[in-house]
Image (cartoon, rainbow, N blue to C red):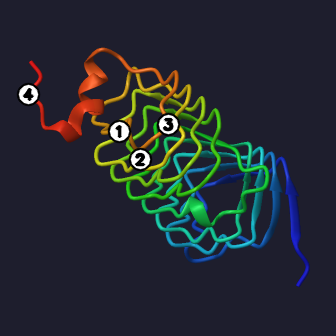
Amino acid sequence: MQQRFMEAEQFDGMDFTTAPLPKGEYEACVFKQCRFGEADLTLVTFSECIFEACDLSMAHVRNTAFKSVQFKNCKMLGLRFDECQTLLLSFAFENCQLNFSSFYKLKLKATLFKKCTLHEVEFKEADLTNTRFDDCDLMRAQFENTVLNGADFRSSINFSIDPERNKVKRTRFSEAGLRGLLHKYDLLID
């Protein structure tokens, strides 16, 4: 089967749950209000693409390549980013719902999460060096053996990070966010 190559195309309102996205490489393409829920994106490459107001919840992304991809206003529940191709893996998220997704063991240095909901997201053993969490809700997000050196949590809420089980050198927190570092001690902070 011949792989498809698409460059600088725009896809508006497409439903890839009923008519699958053809396998291949998509470069500098824009996907607006498209449905990918539970779609099979295995072995698809997205380079410098933008996803706006798309639903990618539970999409299958085993060996999918995301290279310099932006997600804006997307619903992305339960995505297994830990199954993606790791070579040149790079993305940014703005105003996205990423609940129940996994970034297990990924190198995500300097990734931007802006105004995202990240409930119960798995960041275990990931490298989040210099990653920015701007205005994010990290309720029950899992950080264990995670490299958070230089990461910025100053405007985020509901995180719980154990400094003894993660690398937190020069990680930035607001004064109000310090309770997220002391959670395991069951202290009453007024």
Residue pictured at 40% horizontal, 27% vertical: 135
Which is nearer the N-term, disc 3 or disc 2? 2
Which residue was labeled with disc 2? 143
Name the kind of residue labelled 3 in the image: Lys
**Disc 4 or disc 3, which is closer to the eye?**
3
Q: Residue 167 got which mark?
A: 3
Please give the residue where the numbered disc 1 appears in the rendered image.
161
Q: Are marks 4 and 2 in contact (CB under 8 Å)?
A: no
Relative horizontal placement of residue 34, taking residue 180 as reference (left or right): right
Earlier in the chain: of badge 1 and badge 2, it is: 2
The residue positioned farthest toward the top in the image shown: 175
Name the element at disc 2.
Answer: loop
Whole-number angstrom distance, CA of label 3 to CA of label 1? 10 Å
In this rendering, is residue 7 above or below 172? below
Q: Quadrant of the C terminus?
A: top left
Q: Which mark is residue 188?
A: 4
Locate residue 180: give its quadrant: top left
Instruction: Where is residue 107? Give x, y as percent.
Output: 65, 47
Picture coordinates of residue 160 (x, y %)? 30, 39
Mark earlier in primary sequence (3, 1): 1
* Type of amino acid under label 1: Ile
